[in-house]
Image (cartoon, rainbow, N blue to C red):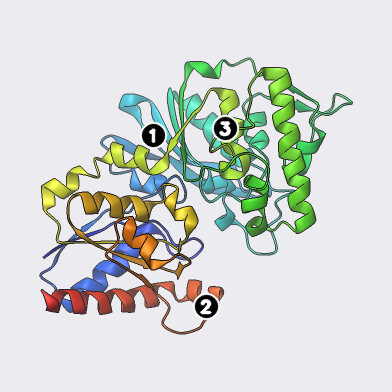
Amino acid sequence: MKILISPDSFKESLGAEEFCQVASQAIKSISPEIEITQMPMSDGGEGMVDSLLILPNSKKINLSSTNPIGKPINCYYNYIETTKTAIIEMASASGLMLLNDFEKNALQTSTIGTGKIIQHALNKGAKKLIIGLGGSATTDAGIGCLAKLGFKFLNAQGKSVSLDGAGLKSIHKIIMPETDYSEFDIQVASDVNNLLYGRQGSAYIFAPQKGASGAEVRQLDDGLKNFATVVKRDLGIDLAEVVGAGAGGGMGAGLLLMGAKSKSGFKIISDLIGFEKLFKKYQFDLVITGEGKLDQQSLNGKVPIEVAKIAKRHKVATLGVFGMIDMENKLAYEHGFDAIFSITNQPITLKQSQKQAKELLYKQVQNLIRFKYHSI
């Protein structure tokens, strides 16, 4: 029996690589002879850099940067010298996982740290950038990042605005940098299709989980709208209807000022590693995938759904294992799953589930393999 384990991360609790390791141990505890292929995946959030370190000539580049509230951190990106390609996670410097509950503040968090990573990669000689936008703690439309790359955001008095969500509403003028970023190939790996502002925009949909109150969500949305207004007036770029502009707290919109092109994060990664070719090479009998939460957002190119679709094309049974399920089972089945399961087996809090994620995942995978293996 051959099994492919290919999940995304469980946010704030379990990385995709850890999922693979725990699931593999659970499978081997039932039947050591089962052949396992581990392929941790990402759709642009945490784990993207690690999932692509398997590419030829990849090298992990360590550097110092700052987290969303300006504290010094150590982080890294993936650099491929032969193609002058830098693969960068926004989450590594501007991610929600870098903050505790008391530090989350969507008005005051900034993408400055991500700008430092991009600048480091460009100084190293990168000509192509792949930037993943998932898992952000920010709602600043990327102005912190852009400011580190030479952009200026001024208020009505000609002074620099604060480079965070609160500063968006004060932007009166944008000055472009001396560097012509159109000379670089910049690809944005996005896992959401949300617009920049409005009821389905970045602030209303994502800012509450980043620590924003109702009043702060409205303030952020007004700021994002003002940002779009000034960008259109000063730079001639209309951000209002750009699908995916709301990704990464509006970073999807901000990077458009550098000439970036947005693509499905999963597609970028799966194409680079030749994911679908694995099915022909190994002839899998079963696929196990999952992530922290299965919900409507999962239909917008999230890893488990995309993995299940590919497995279905190759007629391979697919099991989904999730921290939480907030979707009708029927809808999941229509998108390729044969069965879906939550790791929780009794009523517990989210915090408890996150803390016990490894143990719960291990037991659930054991149960699934015990049934699947002995029923074949």
Callout 1, which amino acid? Tyr
User: Is disc 2 placed on a helix, strand or loop?
Assistant: helix
Mark 2 neighbour density, 10 Å: few (under 14) some (14–19) many (20 or more): few
Question: On the rendered image, what quadrant is the N terminus found in?
Answer: bottom left
Q: Is residue 156 above or below residue 40?
A: above
Percent x, y of residue 331: 39, 60
Pick out the residue farthest to the bottom.
346
Between 334 and 357, the one nearer to me in the picture: 334
Identify the residue position indicated by label 2 in the image. 352
Vertical side of 325 occupied by 375: above or below? below
Q: Which residue is mark 3?
A: 242
The residue that disc 1 covers is: 79
Estimate the x, y position of residue 111 in percent, counting from the top left: 63, 41
**Which residue is depicted at the point 83% across and 29% down?**
155
Q: Reading the chain from its start, which is encountered first: label 2 or label 3? A: 3
Point out the frontmost of discs 3 and 1.
3
Instruction: Give the distance between the C-alpha atoms of the residues marked 3 and 1, in whole angstroms.
Output: 29 Å
